[in-house]
Amino acid sequence: MQQRLYTITQLTQEFGITTRTLRFYEAQGLITPQRRGRQRLYRPADRTRLKLILRGKRLGFALSEIREIIDMYGKAPGEAGQLRLLMDKIALRRAELLDKLKDIEMSLADLDEVEAGCRARMEALGVAHEAGEGGA
């Protein structure tokens, strides 16, 4: 049975990425297509790796972290080790995002406070706040 191969066009369309992005991942050694003349042909394993790379990027992982996770799959301690590493990285990423969320919430509260002060001062000056100038 012949293994299914994918062209660069098929993968870029399926995953909504540019050919430049796919070539970048190839240059980084994250995927290794076969060559037929000038044509790149990607195996199902390359497609799976690409899917994992893009998921890792969406989760905010650096390419070095994504490579580390993917590369563990075929080596000791194998899938169990890969999953432990991934869960550790998820916990770290979650903590980073929660810190950022706290910072954003504090910034929004500060903005609300400053805006309320501006509105109060405008009211004291007898200046009306016009719609469309920001805020609620």
Image: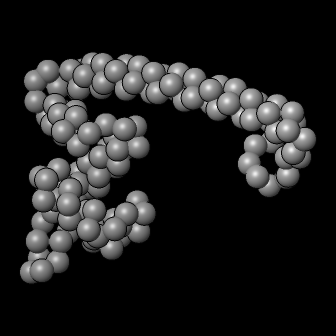
Q: Which of 37 and 64 is in front in this view?
A: 64
State left or right for residue 14 relative to residue 119. Answer: left
Query: Is 83 above or below relative to 64?
Result: above
Rendering quarter of residue 6: bottom left
In-image side of 63 versus 110 (left or right): left
Rendering coords of residue 89 (x, y %): 30, 24
Figure quadrant of residue 124: top right
In this view of the protein, which residue sits in the foreground, 120 or 91?
Answer: 120
How does the figure colour the protein chain or chains? one colour
Say if residue 112 shows up in the picture. Answer: no
Horizontal side, residue 60 vs residue 7: left or right: right
Question: Image quadrant for the N terminus?
Answer: bottom left
Asked if residue 85 can be seen in this view, the reply is yes
Q: In which quarter of the image is the C terminus?
A: top right
Give percent across and percent down for residue 83.
Answer: 29, 23
Q: In this view, does 37 lie to the left or right of 116?
A: left
Position of residue 134 measured from the top left corner of the image (x, y, whole percent): 74, 48
Give residue 94's quadrant in the image: top left
Q: Residue at x 74, y 29 (%)?
A: 117
- Along the viewing direction, whichever of 103 and 121 lies nearer the viewer: 121
x, y percent for residue 19 = 29, 70
Question: In the picture shown, does residue 33 fall above or below 109?
Answer: below
Residue at 42% across / 63% down in the picture?
16
